[in-house]
Image: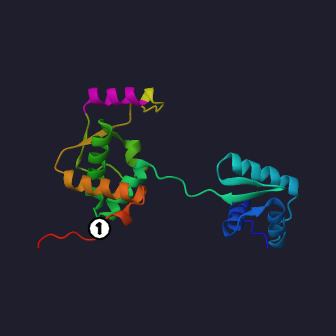
Amino acid sequence: MFSPDKQLKEIILEEIRSEPVSISGLVRKLKSRGIDIHRLVLTGYLKALTDTGVIREKAIPPSKIFTPVGPKEMTIYEAIANACEENGLDKRRATAVAVYTLERLFHRPIFRRELNEMKMGETAELKHAPQATVAEARRILAKAGYRIPESEPAYTVDGEYEHDSRAVLTSALSASYRLSYLALDTKQLTL
């Protein structure tokens, strides 16, 4: 039975996740769920989903088979935030370590929108970056196509966060590239 709470896209993705399917096969599956959609309309919809990168189309003459595209890649901000959580850092320390790490990676102060991308907020450990440095960072980001409003603050952090930063970077890289199977589970500290 058709559920008006679910979008057609979600229903199609459910159907093609279980097995790759052709247009006619998908029409049959949708009809069995109570969704009566014309084959030509569905073809156009599938073409739009393919063009937007939601599904993948593979030609197997005489038909086309549709499969879902894998999960989207994580941004550096999501990877750093997840790694802070994975390393058991409390919110305040995680924010400071994330800013420290990104500041070292990008060689510039970190803007509020970048904190928002990591779902982190301003904490006492963060210091407002000097205006000259912020202006230079805005200029560099504008060249790259990112417009940062003059009113948006940028932060830097003082303190010793190198050890945590390395742990966070290691976790982020390991998760992003699925490297955990290559690493030793334990380290021998003494003989």
Front residue of 98/179: it is 179
Q: Determine the image quadrant of residue 189.
A: bottom left
Residue 132 visible in the displayed image:
yes
| Drawn side of residue 101 relative to residue 146, left or right | left
Q: Residue at x 42, y 56 (%)?
A: 177
For the rendered model, the colour scheme is: rainbow
Stretch of the chain drawn in magenta: 130-141
| Residue 58 picture location, percent across and down | 72, 54
Residue type for callout 1: Leu
63 is within the stretch colored magenta: no
Q: Determine the image quadrant of residue 18.
A: bottom right
Helix, strand or loop under label 1: loop
| Residue 39 picture location, percent across and down | 87, 57
Quadrant in which the N terminus appears: bottom right
Question: Residue under circle 1?
Answer: 184
- Dominant secondary structure of the residues highlighted in magenta in the image: helix
Front residue of 116/42: it is 42
Q: Residue at x 27, y 42 (%)?
A: 104
Front residue of 26/11: it is 26
Q: Residue at x 50, y 52 (%)?
A: 73
Residue 119 visible in the displayed image:
no
Quadrant in which the C terminus appears: bottom left
| Residue 30 picture location, percent across and down | 80, 67
Q: Is residue 153 above or below residue 52?
A: above
| Residue 3 picture location, percent across and down | 75, 69
| Drawn side of residue 34 relative to residue 108, left or right | right
Q: How many marks?
A: 1
| Drawn side of residue 137 relative to residue 158, left or right | right
